[in-house]
Image: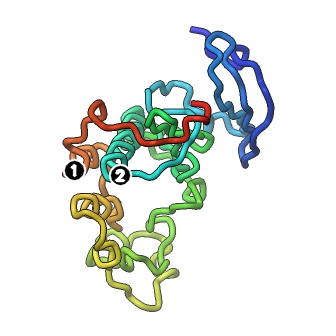
Amino acid sequence: EKNCVDKFDILGIIGWGTYGQVYKAQDKDTGELVALKKFLLDDKEEGFPITLNHQNRLLQSGSAYLSEGHIKAFMKQLMEGLDYCHKKNFLHRDIKSSNILLNNRGQVKLADFGLARSYNSEESRPYTNKVITLHYRPPELLLGEDQLCGSPCPAVWPDVIKLPYFNTMKPKKQYPRCLHKVFSFVPLAALDLLDHMLILDPNKRCTAEQALKSDFLRDVELSKMALPDLLHWQHG
């Protein structure tokens, strides 16, 4: 199957990033407008995972008022995309709002795999804790930060004392977990999922697969979800 830059007409540059440039382009065969990112990589092992092929991937964005049903549908698609990546042994490492895109058909796509890399839990090769999105860093990478989820301590995270920065970055004050109190306005099923996704102990934290089985997402049928009122003048 033809699937390279020659398949597209480059229409112009629409953005720049740390790892390359983003171009507006048009598929020569279908006329579809797309965004292409050219990666500037020094280490080929840290490169773009070209083996991934899934319906929840790249597109252009829109905006709208979202109902709870829409949020469930978008969240399920996001978890399906992540679950697919993880089962293919890839870590995205740059999940943030600007890399979770939405088209005007209500399809959610994961974008920008510039920091993605293959992962093998049985491999002894170390993974740097510096290569990850700045928008969200798990507590095991930033020990000692005052958190909505409470301060890391052995009572809730037994292995935390084994981490190299635990003693050097201890918080001066222990903060209690207050997630349910701060987000009491969120529906309980959604709040329980959020709580599970933000557990401090990574061994107990929710996986994408577990999220799909949660009370919030388990019964979501995407085919029955009404389309959101998106900006139809936008491409995609």
Whole-angstrom CA distance, mark 2 to mark 1, is 19 Å
Residue located at (51% from left, 50% from top): 95
**Badge 2 density bin: few <14, some 14–19, many ≥20, Cα 10 Å:** few
Residue bearing the label numbered 1: 214
Residue 126 visible in this rendered orientation of the protein: no
First in sequence: mark 2 vs mark 1? 2
Q: Depth check: 176 or 10 in front?
A: 10
Residue located at (64% from left, 10% from top): 29
Which disc is residue 67 wearing?
Answer: 2
Which disc is residue 28 wearing?
Answer: none
Element at label 2: loop
Image location (x, y in percent) of residue 196:
28, 61
Task: Locate residue 204 relative to residue 233 in the image: left or right.
Answer: left
Q: Which amino acid does the dot numbered 2 rest on? A: Ser
Residue lying furthest bottom in this view? 172
Q: Is residue 109 above or below residue 127?
A: above
Residue 221 visible in this rendered orientation of the protein: yes
Q: Is residue 31 above or below residue 225?
A: above
Instruction: Place residue 131 in its image quadrant.
Output: bottom right
Task: Locate residue 38 relative to residue 144 in the image: left or right.
Answer: right
Residue located at (25% from left, 36% from top): 221
Q: Is residue 233 above or below residue 179?
A: above
Residue located at (32% from left, 61% from top): 194
Q: Is residue 22 above or below residue 146?
A: above
